[in-house]
Amino acid sequence: ARTRSSTHTARMSAAAAWSAPITTPRVVRVTTATARSSSSSSSSSGKQATSSSEPKKLKLGRRVLGGNGLASVAGLAAGLQLMTPQLADARNQRSYADMMKARAEAEKRRDEMEMESNPGVLVTLPSGIQYRQLDEGRAESKEAVKGDTLYVLYTIYRLAPGAYFKYSSGGTPIFLWSRGYGNEGQDDVGSTYRFVLGEPGALPRAVVPAVLGMREGGKRRVLVPPEVGWVDGNVRPRPATFGGGRRLENHREEPLIMEVDLVRVRKPSEASSAGDLEEDLKGNFLFKMPAPPSPFKNLLGEVPDALTPEAAAAAVAIDV
């Protein structure tokens, strides 16, 4: 009987729980007035507690905007609405004028830098070859034409990667070799390179038309494309040092620059002077004139194989 009563009680409790009405949670809508009243009440009730628990950023926002910040935000919105389109357009126009002024100043500075790095006037021939006239030379001097013998100093450069298409507006030259300036420890200051203008192989093909018309004392910087430059070993001038030769072999398929300084022009009708003949004979000769037999050999107990009459007479005079 006790077991039946406990079972009956458990069934009645489960039925009561099943039949109880379902209650939904209450949604509380917090309006601006409610938040304002709650904030005012909380501030009046415990100002010290609020200041201690309020974050620092929220405190700073209250100080800047004043109070809860609603009035300040409303005033800022009203001020933005008062701005007219005319004032906005005027401000935009001033900004555009400033930008155009800054652009003009930048372009002027760029032109000045180009002139500093690439002096002279850029000349483009009908064939497309370009050169810069660095010095026009002496007005009363002779002008170089085909068939003349020219005496020049020169320097060969290569351009930095990517500078070939920027040659008209600048390009960084890198030294390869030279003649007549004493570079790389060479004793060649003032030593000129002599050639006949128009002679095959005397100059790269790109340099020949750029040199035509130069006057003595003139200087030109010629851009040499690889197709009309040092295409093989027969094209002169060639480097005099091992390092210069290696640099030419490594970069001869790149655009190069030849800077030519014209020292002298000799016309075909002019006779060669002693200095010209001496210049023509300059070279690194490995053979030297042997010394004459010494007349002192017989004094040292050495008998020469054969003596010239002059040597024999000198030897006799010394013995006496």
Image (tube, helix red, strand yellow):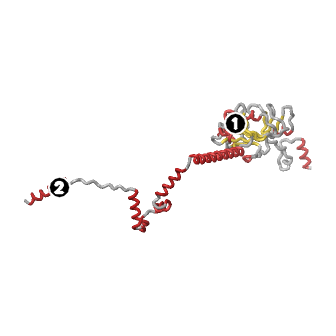
Amino acid type assigned to the residue bearing label 2 in the image: Ala
- Classed neighbour count for the residue bearing mark 2: other residues with Cα under 10 Å, few (<14), some (14–19), many (≥20): few
Q: Residue at x 91, y 44 (%)?
A: 313
**Residue under numbered circle 1:** 224
* Quarter of the picture holding the N terminus: bottom left
Instruction: Say the numbered circle drawn on residue 16.
Output: 2
For residue 284, say whether it is visible.
no
**Looking at this view, is 121 or 8 the one in front?**
8
Please name which of the two marks, 1 or 2, marks the residue nearer to the observer: 2
For residue 183, say whether it is visible.
yes
Q: Residue at x 78, y 45 (%)?
A: 189
User: Which one is earlier in the sequence, the residue at label 1 or at label 2?
Assistant: 2
| Residue 294 location (% of width, % of height) | 85, 46
Amino acid type assigned to the residue bearing label 1 in the image: Val
| Residue 185 location (% of width, % of height) | 73, 48
Q: Kindly indicate the quadrant of the structure image that contains residue 104.
A: top right
**Looking at this view, is 9 or 293 the one in front?**
9
| Residue 222 location (% of width, % of height) | 72, 38
- Dot 1 lies on which element? strand
Q: Kindly indicate the quadrant of the structure image that contains residue 100.
A: top right
**Looking at this view, is 58 or 201 the one in front?**
58
Q: CA distance from mark 1 to mark 2?
A: 106 Å
**Looking at this view, is 2 or 36 the one in front?**
36
